[in-house]
Amino acid sequence: MNKNDRAKIAFLIGISAIAIMLLLFVDMKSGKTSEDQYANYFVSVTEKSVNLTRAFQNEIGLWQLGQISNVTMAEVTDNYLKNFTSQISDFNETDSPEIFRSAKENLLNSFANEIKSYEFFRDYLLTGNVTKNDISTDFLSQALEDEALSFKIYQQIINETNS
C-alpha cells in the first residue's frame, strides 16, 4: 500500500471516528433550544458527509482493485463531486447560532478541501500526472485537519452548554 492509499484510508477512518464521537456528545433531550437544534443538524450534516465519503472511498477501493478503469473512476468522481458540492451549498446556506460560527466555518473549509482533493484526483485519473494525485492527498489531509478542528470546537460548545 503506497503513501497516498494510506492517507486516504486514514482520512476515511478519521472521519468515521469523529462522526461516532459526535453522536456520543449530542444531547437529544426534548425541549430543544435553537442551539440544541443546530447541534443536532450539525451532526446530521456530518453523518451525511461521512456516508458520502465512505461510499466514494468504496468506489476508490474498486478502482484500486482494477475493477474500475481510470476513465470510469473519473466519471464516478464527477458524480460524487456533484453530491459533495450540493452538500456544502446546503450547509453553507443554513444559518447557525453565533456560538457555532467557528465550528461551521471549519467544517465548510473541510468540505471545500475535500472537493478540491477529488477534483485533483479526477484530473490525476485522466492525465496520469502524479503531481495532481499528490496535491489531491494534500487537500485531503487539510480537509481532515479542518474537520478535526471543527469537531473540537463543537465538542467544547456541547461540553460548555451541558455543564
Image (cartoon, grey):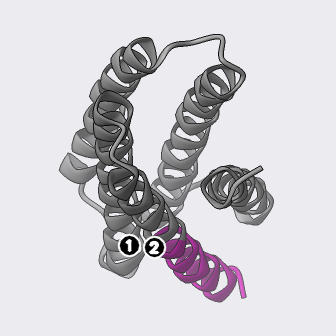
Q: Secondary structure at mark 2?
A: helix
Write the residue at 35% across / 80% down: 102
The answer to whether 27 appears left or right of 147 in the picture is: right
Q: Which residue is mark 2?
A: 146
In this rendering, the answer to whether 55 lies above or below 161 is above
- Is residue 150 a member of the stretch shown in magenta? yes
Residue range corresponding to the magenta coloring: 145-163
Amino acid type indicated by mark 2: Asp
Front in this rendered view, residue 11 or 48: 11
Q: Is residue 67 above or below residue 107?
A: above
Three-letter residue code for mark 1: Asn
Q: Residue at x 44, y 21 (%)?
A: 70
Per the image, is 162 magenta? yes
> Mark number for residue 23?
none
Prevailing SS of the magenta stretch: helix
- Residue 126 as seen in the image, left or right of residue 56: left
Whether residue 131 appears in this view of the structure is: yes
Residue 66 rendering spot, x and y as whole percentages: 66, 17
Q: Which residue is mark 1?
A: 106
Q: Are marks 2 and 1 in contact (CB under 8 Å)?
A: yes
- 43 vs 127, left or right, is right
Decide if residue 142 is on the left or right side of residue 63.
Answer: left
Say above or below: 102 vs 34: below
